[in-house]
Image (cartoon, rainbow, N blue to C red):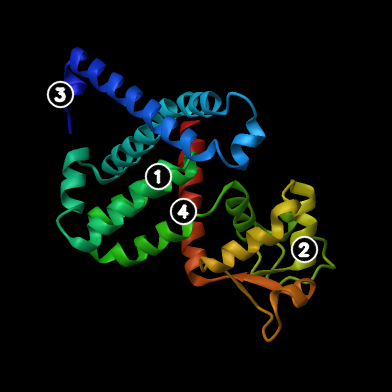
Amino acid sequence: MTTEADSDPAAGAVVARAGKDAAIAAGGAVAGYLVGGPEGAVLGAGAPALIESGWAAVATTLGRRRRERVGFVVAYAAKCAGVKPDELAAELQRDPAAEELFIRTLTAAQDAALTEKLMAFAMALSATFDDSSKVGWESAFVRALDPLDHAGLRVLSWFNETPVLLGLTPDDRYRGAVDETVLWLRWDHLNDIASRRGVVAVLEQTLATLEQVGLLAPLTTGQSYQSSLESKQWGVTDFGRAFLSRMQTVSGTIKAVS
């Protein structure tokens, strides 16, 4: 939707000034709240001014980047669906379930800096525009993708690789043929791969997150996570396989335009 500020430079300047004034006011409020506590003590003399300048340094950029991310997701979703952005937005707001997905997706997109996440969010909206019966699955997809960072996406992608690409030797016990993607991986496999690929420091937390969102499932049962970590093995859930397929499509699209 085009606003008066978008079409009128003078109005745009007014909006920009108002935004700056609001940022300074908000920064002052934050400074007033923190300056008397340990945060103020850490900063030392001039804490209010320092806190305000810290907020002012990022407020405009954060607001602009969030707007750009939401705009990209809506625009790319519309492109995938073959419609105009306003048509896509209007259609997805006709049904309460689709509107909830629309709002959840755009909310998540605001803080997603990874291109693959933004494109995947857009594909979820596009798929729902084409077929409203997919709202349930696409909502689950967005909920699962939202908390994943770069490490989470990387670790999950290992379950879409062959043993050879993962550097596993013929002596390693993994189910599946050497030229097929792995069906499960043990802790020692994952720890070795993570060490070679630079994510070993966050591996345990990443696996816990992938389990929590339903993409991986532990194949060892009856023991606590902490006490049985080294004996555990993980497999991709059916939902995880479909999730991986979507992310593979995203990766292929990015490579095609790079």
Between tags 4 and 3, which lies in front?
A: 3
Give how far apart the Cα atoms at labels 1 and 4 are.
8 Å
Q: Are marks 3 and 2 in contact (CB under 8 Å)?
A: no
Q: Which residue is mark 3?
A: 4
Q: Amino acid at mark 2?
A: His
Up-down relation of residue 121 to residue 156 (above or below): above
Q: Are marks 1 and 4 in contact (CB under 8 Å)?
A: no
Classify residue 101 by image quadrant. Answer: bottom left
Classify residue 205 by image quadrant. Answer: bottom right
Label 3 secondary element: helix
Q: Nearer the viewer, residue 161 or 32?
A: 32
Between tags 3 and 2, which lies in front?
A: 3
Q: Which residue is mark 4?
A: 146
First-in-chain label (1 vs 3): 3
Give how far apart the Cα atoms at labels 1 and 2 are.
33 Å
Name the disc covering residue 189, or none. 2
Extreme-right residue of the structure = 171
Name the disc covering residue 109, or none. 1
Q: Residues within 10 Å of mark 2 (few under 14, many from 20)?
A: some
Counting from the top left corner in percent of width and height, residue 34 is at: 53, 39
Q: Amino acid at mark 3?
A: Glu
